Each structure stands twice: as C-alpha cells, then as structure tokens.
Image (spheres, grey):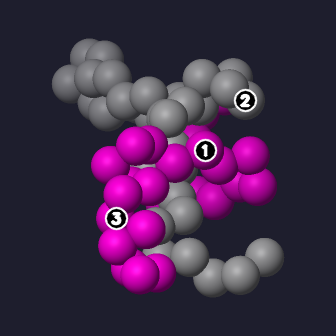
C-alpha cells in the first residue's frame, strides 16, 4: 500500500467518537470494535472533505 498522510481511522466515514463517563471512546462502525484515531485499516473509506483535500494534493 502506498503512503497516504490522510489515511487514518479518524478520517474514515465509519469512525465514531463518543464521550462516556468523561472518557473519549473511539469505535469503528464497520468493523464493530474499539479503535484509535491514528490506526489504519485497508477498509478505509475517507470522508468527503478528506477526498477533496486529497484531490487538491494530487492536482
């Protein structure tokens, strides 16, 4: 896989963050388990604003 500075769970459409009992919890809605914002998985599907940033970077 080529290096992509945008590729991380936090920029994926499936990334969910919620605050429970004063603590932030990060969850992947697609994979169904806890994750961290900087993790990278091959199922990554970037959010629309990230796609726009990536297209600006390549043009």
- Foreground of the two, 26 or 46: 46
Quick one: label 2 or label 3, which is nearer the N terminus? 2
**Is 33 positioned to the left or the right of 47 in the image?**
right
- How many callouts does the rendering have? 3
Residue 32 belongs to the span the image colors magenta: no
- Foreground of the two, 9 or 56: 56
Question: Label 1, on which residue?
Answer: 45
Question: Label 3, on which residue?
Answer: 53
What is the x, y in percent for residue 4? 56, 76
**Is 22 positioned to the left or the right of 54 in the image?**
left
What is the quadrant of the N terminus in the image?
bottom right
Mark 2–mark 3 distance (CA, rounded to whole Å): 25 Å
Q: At numbered mark 2, what does the secondary structure look like: helix, strand or loop?
A: loop
In the image, farthest residue toward the top: 21
Residue sitting at 32 percent across and 33 percent down?
24
Mark 1–mark 2 distance (CA, rounded to whole Å): 12 Å
Q: Residues within 10 Å of mark 1 (few under 14, many from 20)?
A: some
Question: Label 2, on which residue?
Answer: 31
Residue 57 vertical position relative to residue 50 in the rendered view, above or below: below
Of badges 3 and 1, nearer the viewer stands 3
In the image, farthest residue toward the front: 59
Residue sitting at 35 percent across and 73 percent down?
56
Residue 44 visible to the viewer: yes
Magenta-drawn segment: 33-59
């Amino acid at each position: 896989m080529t290096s992509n500075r945008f590729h991380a769970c936090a920029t994926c459409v499936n990334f969910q963050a919620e605050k429970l009992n004063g603590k932030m919890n990060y969850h992947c809605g697609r994979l169904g388990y806890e994750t961290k914002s900087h993790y990278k998985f091959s199922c990554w599907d970037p959010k629309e604003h990230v796609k726009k940033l990536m297209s600006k970077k390549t043009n």
